[in-house]
Image (tube, grey):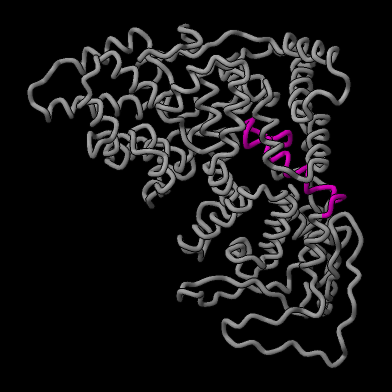
């Protein structure tokens, strides 16, 4: 079966596999799009247009204004093939199946992209993919002392939050109070270290690198040592205890003592960058009062004069504290008027889908990092709060924008264009690679969801990008992909997978080759590609082993090239 394609014009040079890459659609300048929006406004009174279209139009208007200011040419509109693969990887963490590709390409409806986005946002794979993305944000690749089964339970807990579409501030509240079953892993990685906890909470949830003010006042920002130790005071009493679970498995419980302070010897003000804190000989270490970042000190009641902290046995959880500092910190962090939470969140979510944040890196808001599009950042922040921190809503608006759906080719050579004048090109994560291989080789979505990266895969492919746009494929990655059997084995005809079904099929070889390309690369082959594959596979070898070997080689050529390794 032949599938309708947007265009047969090549838009990029041949890849590693040596084949061309036809993916250019009709150019739709954003100026024309804006004109259509203005026309719609004439016929529909204010407020009559669907509310969910407003933000995506604002995104496009502000992004285009940035292009015009810098005299950048607007990119072309992505083809259906490019968009399809991109949106599947970004929303559900794997490429579309052969059936999903056919369904989308054969849909001639004017809103097929919007309808597909809504479908994927309701797909259980979306919840799982968001859980994986945030698990890596919260824990990184290799947190110390965390068992695989504990991390699996944590990801399932995260997926449940996205499935229920819990507001982002509520998810943060749950993570930092750590009372729900399997929600405690975020604190568990710090093993009670108040310094590590403070550094991570500030960076992940508030987009602030406060740790630079630990030894001296921040050299590039307004934060002082007083700010750092003031925030650390909220977490200094937090304890993490590992206990036996219901099935004799290990789990973590997060508790808090009623006593304990951050102490400091010397001056907490006026210390310049690079200078040691001012100290007085024989000075006594003084407790530092908890202080909200950029705000006032915590109003904390005095403990009873005769209060003594209970002595805890090994692996015993402390009783509820008389007064919880951490609870007050969580209330402040998740308050609607917190000046950092929503801004940091939309910057991170925008970067997840657009390649880089308005502030880059995403977790380093400071006075020297001016946002690339400050008005758009402010608009997204305000809209996010107004829509009750609805992550799914925000993602829907971003991926429905013309800015997200732009072509991924253009004059910019930056891996992550600062003004989004070209869609990002990124390597697939190890999870995406493995899941996609299960999909394209015909093992199915269920098999893809159950696939788990091995230690070797995580070692060689676990860090496809450092988040700075400086990805460079390593020799060890190349050897693992091309000489190892982990991925190659999935291309081998076996147990009714795609290579096996193609060998058994009575369809013509042209149709078989088309199915291979649609399954692996989400596009039909060029005439040259089709002829070369048909010529190689249509030798009608009498030996079944030779036929199987040729099919394996043909599949492997497609999955081992850069076109499959990246998101385009």
Give the magenta-colored segment's residue range: 335-359
The quadrant of the image that shows the N terminus is top left
Percent coordinates x, y for residue 129 in the rendering? 54, 43
In the rendered image, the residue lying farthest to the bottom is: 306
Instruction: Write the residue at 37% across / 36% down.
Output: 437
- The answer to whether one can see residue 475 in this image is no
* Above/below status of 445 relative to 562: below
Left or right position of 246 against 541: right
What is the quadrant of residue 487 in the picture?
Answer: top left
What is the quadrant of residue 549 in the picture?
Answer: top left
* Above/below status of 413 relative to 390: above
Left or right position of 87 against 229: left
What is the quadrant of residue 478 in the picture?
Answer: top left
Percent coordinates x, y for residue 203 in the rendering? 70, 51
Instruction: Write the residue at 75% across / 10% down.
Output: 31
In the rendered image, the residue lying farthest to the left is: 542
Percent coordinates x, y for residue 272 in the rendering? 83, 54
Instruction: Write the residue at 41% across / 27% down.
Output: 99
Q: Nearer the viewer, residue 471 or 402?
A: 402
Percent coordinates x, y for residue 96 in the rendering? 46, 30
Question: Is-magenta flag for residue 357?
Answer: yes
Q: Nearer the viewer, residue 263 or 323?
A: 323
């Amino acid at each position: 079966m032949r599938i309708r394609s947007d265009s047969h014009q090549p838009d990029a040079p041949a890849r590693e596999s040596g084949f061309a890459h036809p993916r250019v659609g009709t150019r739709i300048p954003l100026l024309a799009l804006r004109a259509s929006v203005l026309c719609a406004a004439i016929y529909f009174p204010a407020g009559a247009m669907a509310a969910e279209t407003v933000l995506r139009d604002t995104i496009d208007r502000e992004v285009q204004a940035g292009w015009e200011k810098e005299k950048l040419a607007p990119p072309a509109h992505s083809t259906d093939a490019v968009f399809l693969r991109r949106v599947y990887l970004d929303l559900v963490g794997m490429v579309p199946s052969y059936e999903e590709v056919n369904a989308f390409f054969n849909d001639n409806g004017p809103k097929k992209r919007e309808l597909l986005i809504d479908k994927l946002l309701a797909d259980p794979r979306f919840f799982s993919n968001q859980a994986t993305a945030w698990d890596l944000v919260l824990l990184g690749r290799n947190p110390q002392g965390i068992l695989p089964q504990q991390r699996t339970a944590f990801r399932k807990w995260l997926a449940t939050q996205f499935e229920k579409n819990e507001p982002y501030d509520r998810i943060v509240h749950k993570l930092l109070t750590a009372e729900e079953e399997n929600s405690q892993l975020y604190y568990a990685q710090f093993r009670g270290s108040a310094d590590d906890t403070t550094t991570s909470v500030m960076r992940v949830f508030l987009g602030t690198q406060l740790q630079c003010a630990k030894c001296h006042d921040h050299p590039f920002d307004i934060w002082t040592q007083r700010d750092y130790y003031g925030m650390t005071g909220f977490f200094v009493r937090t304890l993490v205890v590992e206990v036996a679970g219901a099935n004799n498995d290990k789990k973590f419980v997060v508790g808090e003592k009623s006593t304990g302070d951050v102490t400091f010897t010397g001056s907490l003000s006026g210390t310049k960058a690079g200078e040691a804190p001012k100290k007085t000989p024989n000075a006594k270490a003084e407790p530092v009062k908890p202080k909200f970042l950029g705000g006032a000190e915590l109003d904390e009641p005095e403990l009873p004069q005769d209060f003594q902290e209970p002595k805890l046995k090994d692996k015993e959880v402390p009783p509820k504290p008389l007064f919880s500092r951490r609870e007050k910190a969580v209330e402040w962090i998740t308050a609607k008027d917190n000046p950092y939470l929503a801004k940091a969140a939309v910057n991170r979510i925008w970067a997840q889908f657009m390649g880089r944040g308005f502030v880059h890196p995403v977790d380093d808001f400071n006075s020297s990092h001016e946002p690339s599009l400050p008005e758009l950042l402010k608009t997204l922040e305000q809209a996010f709060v107004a829509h009750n921190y609805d992550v799914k809503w925000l993602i829907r608006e971003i991926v429905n924008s013309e800015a997200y759906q732009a072509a991924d080719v253009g004059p910019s050579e930056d891996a992550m264009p600062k003004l989004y004048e070209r869609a990002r090109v990124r390597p697939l994560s190890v999870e995406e690679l493995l899941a996609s291989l299960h999909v394209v080789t015909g093992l199915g979505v269920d098999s893809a969801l159950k696939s788990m990266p091995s230690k070797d895969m995580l070692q060689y492919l676990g860090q496809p990008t450092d988040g700075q746009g400086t990805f460079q494929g390593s020799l060890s990655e190349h050897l693992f992909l091309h000489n190892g059997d982990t991925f190659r084995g999935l291309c081998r005809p076996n147990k009714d997978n795609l290579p096996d079904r193609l060998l058994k099929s009575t369809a013509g070889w042209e149709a078989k080759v088309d199915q291979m390309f649609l399954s692996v690369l989400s596009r039909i082959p060029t005439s040259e590609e089709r002829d070369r594959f048909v010529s190689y596979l249509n030798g009608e070898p009498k030996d079944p082993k030779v036929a199987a070997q040729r099919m394996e080689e043909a599949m492997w050529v497609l999955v081992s090239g850069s076109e499959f390794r990246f998101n385009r």
